[in-house]
Amino acid sequence: MKLNDFKVHLIALIVLIVSFGIYYFSSASQGIDEIKFATRLLAFAGTVLLSVSFLLGPIRSFKPDLAKYLKYRKWIGLWGAIFILIHFLLAMNFHYRWSFSALFNFDNPFGFAFTMAVISFVVFILMTLTSNAKSMQKLGIRKWKCLHRIGYIALFLGIMHALYIPQSIFFSTRHGMFLVALVAIALLLKAVSIIKDIKKHPVC
């Protein structure tokens, strides 16, 4: 294993441990079972890692010297996607019992939140599967970039998913506000970066 790869795996582990500490001592974890605790923990840790991965792209437009950290972007994003995948599987198996028909029903209080979660999840999986040189070559650089830009929309939908969960207190917590701010910064920097790129290259 390369040293740089080891560092990224260590970062992912640290984020998971810190997230565990935040949730363990948070009022948001009181009165919930272990499965729900793990589900929320993985969603938080995964979104943090994905946000950092998305930040590393546009931030180099403003700080070119930070481009050296782009080598960490792939694994940070992959670990974030893995955490989100486990979060999704836990939620579907233990909370929703794989009842897609009920959850896609907008009369169901969870319907809208679930729909946004599924869209976000599918995009992240597609990004994960195409995060390699072979996919970039097959799709072409322009189509590949277009696909991965959609990831920012998926990141936004992921946050909205948490917002629309009935009786959610996530956004009344400090860690919830931190995550919203982190996602907002990633989206804002990407928007500014795209505007700058429009002046140089056509957009997808």
Image (cartoon, rainbow, N blue to C red):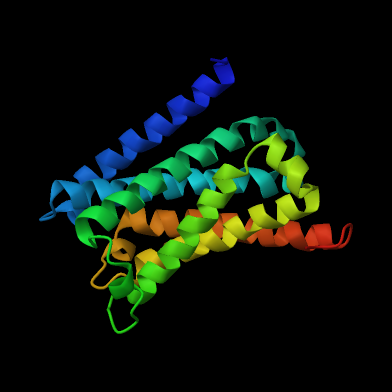
**Could you tell me which residue is drawn at 39 percent across and 59 percent down?**
177
The outermost residue toward the left is: 31
Is residue 204 or residue 60 the one in the foreground? 204
Query: Residue 69 at x, y = what percent?
Result: 64, 32
Total numbered labels placed on residues in the image: 0
The answer to whether residue 149 is left or right of residue 11 is right
Closest to the observer: 10 or 117?
117
Instruction: Please indicate, yes or no, whether residue 95 appears anywhere in the rendered image.
Output: yes
Please name whichever residue, 109 or 101, is drawn nearer the observer in this view of the structure. 101
Q: Position of residue 154 (x, y in %)?
A: 53, 60
Quadrant location, the C terminus:
bottom right
Q: Is residue 56 left or right of residue 94?
A: right
Asked if residue 93 is positioned above or below residue 167 in the image, the reply reads above
Is residue 26 visible in the rendered image? The answer is no
Q: Nearer the viewer, residue 77 or 124?
A: 124
Rendering coords of residue 80 (x, y %): 46, 43
Q: Residue at x 72, y 50 (%)?
A: 144
From what the image shows, is residue 73 above or below residue 189? Answer: above
Can you name the residue that lies furthest to the right here? Answer: 200
Residue 20, compared with residue 125, is above or below; it is above
Q: Residue most toward the bottom?
A: 107
Position in image of residue 150 (x %, y %): 62, 60
Determine the residue positioned at 51% across, 50% down.
125
Residue displayed at 21% across by 59% down: 95
